[in-house]
Image (cartoon, helix red, strand yellow):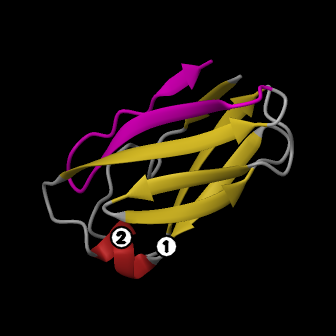
């Protein structure tokens, strides 16, 4: 089982213009069945997505994006489990910044 978080805000930086819109965070999986839920955590909030065709996307509402402080760096984690791998949980992490770099990650179990 493998999961990854893609680039956040295309260039791994949430800028002032992007903070005025919803933010999509997406990623991919391998060995995870369609219909499994992905929980993405950012700045104390959780967002739910569903795996379809080894891909997932969650939407962070504009109000939550706007709450990110300029120059800040925020951990982003995504948790997904697989029925096929009973009891297995893939946790992946990235850092989402407002005016600073994001480091997408991937992890396999």
| Magenta-drawn stretch contains 75 | no
Q: SS for tag 2?
A: helix
Q: Residue 85's x, y, as percent?
A: 77, 25
Q: SS for tag 1?
A: loop
In the displayed orientation, state which residue is furthest to the bottom: 63
In the displayed orientation, state which residue is furthest to the top: 109
Q: Residue 19's x, y, as percent?
A: 34, 71
Query: In the rendered structure, which segment of residues is drawn in magenta?
Result: 85-109
Is 64 situated left or right of 79 in this image?
A: left
| Magenta-drawn stretch contains 101 | yes
Q: Residue 100's x, y, as percent?
A: 21, 45
Q: Determine the residue positioned at 36% across, 74% down.
A: 64
User: Which residue in the protein does label 1 denote?
Assistant: 22
Which label number is shown at residue 65? Answer: 2
Is 79 situated left or right of 69 in this image?
A: right
Q: Determine the residue positioned at 44% across, 44% down.
A: 77
Q: Determine the residue positioned at 33% across, 57% down.
A: 14
Depth order, front residue of 81/97: 81
Cα–Cα gap, marks 1 and 2:
7 Å
Is 104 situated left or right of 14 in this image?
A: right
- Camera sees residue 47: yes
Q: Determine the residue positioned at 70% across, 49% down.
A: 56
Is 80 situated left or right of 86 in this image?
A: left
- Disc 1 and disc 2 in contact, CB within 8 angstroms: yes
Q: Quadrant of the N terminus?
A: top right
């Amino acid at each position: 089982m493998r999961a990854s978080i893609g680039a956040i805000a295309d260039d791994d930086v949430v800028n002032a213009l992007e903070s005025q819109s919803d933010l999509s965070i997406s990623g991919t999986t391998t060995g995870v069945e369609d219909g499994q839920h992905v929980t993405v955590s950012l700045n104390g909030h959780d967002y739910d997505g569903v795996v379809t065709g080894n891909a997932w996307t969650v939407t962070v509402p504009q109000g939550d994006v706007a709450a990110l402080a300029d120059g800040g760096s925020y951990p982003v984690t995504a948790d997904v489990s697989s029925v096929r791998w009973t009891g297995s949980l893939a946790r992946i992490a990235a850092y989402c910044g407002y005016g600073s770099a994001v480091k997408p990650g991937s992890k396999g179990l």
